[in-house]
Structures are given as structure tokens and as C-alpha cells.
Amino acid sequence: MKNIYIVDEYISSQKNGIGTFLNELLFCLKGNDCNLNLLAFNANVEEFNITEKDGIKRYLFPVFKNGHFLQHSKIIEKFLRLYIPDSSENIFFLNHSPCADFIESLKTTHPLSKVIFTIHDFGWTNFLMGDIRRYKKIIKTEESPEAKPIVESYKNDKRMYDLADGIICLSKDTYRLLQDVYKVNKSKLFHIPNGHRDIHTDTNQCKDEIKRSLRLNSEGKILLFVGRPTKSKGIYDLIAAMHNVLTHCPQTKLVIVGDGNEVNVKEIIKATSSIASSVIFTGQIDKNELTKWLTIADIGIISSYYEQCSYTGIEMMMFGLPIVASDGFGVRNMFQDGTNARIARIGNRKKSKEFETNLAEAILELLLSEELCKQLSNGARQVYEMRYTSSKMEDGYRELLT
């Protein structure tokens, strides 16, 4: 029987897709004849303790006050030696980076155990807004002084991937990148997209009721954006596109769901000031509230410059939303034009208006065509059922564990 140890950084994963991923991963692994353990760092506890609930043993570590928990591998090493015996049946699943030192420490204390790393993001994507061609060029030529942090990030990632026994790629773009650029042996790579339990029910009859509870009138379409409202998520391109959209469909509302820092929020308020009556900014909300917006939304927007395997995208497909998506790194693996989305191409990143123009055109095309919306809605639900259910995710992990 396999002993699974899933490493989590509690504070951050409560606010991003890793938290959803871990919940789905635990659900998938429960039925696969293994002992499940969660190593939760920076948990909401005063001192280290171990609890057990619903068949999952949780090792809870309090907040490390100095630096990220991965920088304290020597302290963690002592706890792992004390509480977790080494065994060839052990598999450690890591989800946070950079963690090369942490993996090296694990290899020292638990040489028989296996270490699997899941790529939820790359360091270079934020620097380059997901521009894979430029990234490959920089790594090849190490051009310009500003390339230094990108090259350093590449070297750290390369060391991490070399140390790991296996690497889970959530998208085909990442799978290919690890082979072509990082030169990782194919035998170490597993392409397992995220999966999600189906929480959608037929709620057509209560849409009007939900709208009334949210003080919304029944007129006008609702565009839904879910995620951190940052430049890399395409939020400013989307807001700029809304000016064009509102010229043709003035009753349209843009709903922005997601938590930003103080600077982000101020910038969003400034960017939306001239169309403030057409924008609803909810901040971070719980799952029940999000379900309401997914239920009443007319169109979902995935305007990211890069993703790995967006849970927001999966949820929108689950709810059968017609979707406007970018062709960003990873996003293009989830959405195909005319099948489950209308694609708004990012185009030349040096031409600031190109992406916002394409977003506006794609959104207007959906707003003005019920037939296209119905086609994409059906396609979105079908793609979810074919690729992104929890059972599909479980199949991938079952194959990895055998």
C-alpha cells in the first residue's frame, strides 16, 4: 500500500487554484488503496500537531516567521525523520516552488521515497507574460542584462526537475516545454490535467430569483471574470475592451470576482472609473456565492496570458457557459475556437490595442448571437465531461501510482 504525503502551504493555497487542486487530489486518491497524509505548512495552529479526520492524517506546522517554509528545510528535516519512516512505498507530492533544496533534503532523509512535483506555475511566465517564443530565445542566447532573473529562474527550475522522480504537467504546453527546453526525460513526465467534481445542477428556474437576490435587473447580459485581477490575467485588456462592448451593448455588466492587493484594487477602480456603473467588483467570495454568479452569467471570460490548467475555466465549462478565451500559454490547450470557446488572440504584445480589440470583437460576437452561444455552451459542457471531470483526473493518478 502506497503512503502518500502531500505538501501544502496553507495560507497561499486557500486563495488560489492550488487549494482547489488539493481538495480534488485528495478526493481522487481516497479510493486508490493508499494511506493519505497532508503536510500543511503555515497552518492556522500555534504549535506543531498531528490530527486525523476522514481517513486523512494531517501534519500541521505553524507559521514560519522568517521566510518561506521551503527555506527551512533543515528544521523540517528533523520532523520528517521523527514522524515519517523512509520506505519505497512513500510518495511525496510537492506543489510549491522553488523547492530544489527541499527535494535535496528529502532525498537525504528519505532516500527510498519518491518525490513527485506538480507544476502549477513557472517563474518566467510573469516576467514575460507567457511569451514562450521570447523565453526560448532568452534561454538560448541569455540576451541582455534584464534576462538575468529569467535565466536564474530557469536554472533553479532545471535543478528542481532533475532532482524530482516524477513531474506532473497540467497542460500539453508545459509537457512539451519540459522536453524541448528543460530536456527532462519523457519517462519522468506525466500529463494529468486538473479535474473537478460536478457541482452544476439545472438551475434555469432560479436564475431570476438569484438575480433579484443580487439586486440585478433581468435586462442586459452578464460577463463573468474570475481570478486575481492582475495584468497577467488580462484584466486591463478586458476593461479596455468593455468600452467598445458598451458602445454596442450598453446594458452589459462585467462582474470581476477575485482578490487583489491594495495596489491592484486601486488600479482597477481607476481603470473602470468611466464605466463604473457597468462593472461589479466583488472581491474574493466563497464557493456558494461564486456558484450564484456562475449560474446567472451569460458569458465567461478567460483573458489570461498564461495558465497551467485553469480551475476557473473548468468551472465555467462545467456550468455550460459560452466562453471567450485568450490563446495564451496553457489556455490554448483547454479551449478551441468554435468548439468550446471563441478565441481572442493576444497577438503582438508590443501592440497594446491588439488583444483588447480582439476581446471586444469576440465578446460582441457572442452577445449578438444566441445561436453561437448555444453552440459553445453545449461544446463547453461536452469538453468538461470528456477531459476535466474528477474521474478523468483519478484515472491519471491511478496510472501514476501503478
Image (spheres, helix red, strand yellow):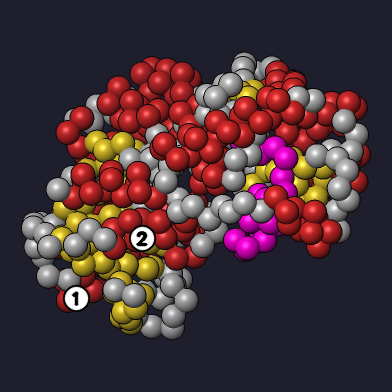
The image position of residue 225, as x and y in percent, is: 68, 43
Residue at 28%, 43% in the rendered image: 396
Specify whether 108 is left or right of 326: left
Amino acid identity at mark 2:
Phe
Residue identified by numbered label 1: 83
Specify whether 374 is left or right of 146: right
Q: Secondary structure at mark 2?
A: helix
Residue identified by numbered label 2: 27
Regarding residue 106, the answer to whether it shows in the image is no
- Label number found at residue 8: none
Extent of the magenta region: 283-302
Relative to 323, does residue 216 appear above or below in the rendering? below
Specify whether 109 is left or right of 31: left
Inter-mark Cα distance, 2 to 1: 24 Å
Instruction: Find residue 321 and report its image quarter.
Output: top right
Task: Report if the CB atoms under discs 2 and 1 are less than 8 Å apart.
Answer: no
Relative to 90, does residue 170 appear above or below in the rendering? above
The image position of residue 170, as x and y in percent, is: 38, 39
Relative to 183, does residue 51 appear above or below in the rendering? below
Residue at 75%, 47% in the rendered image: 255
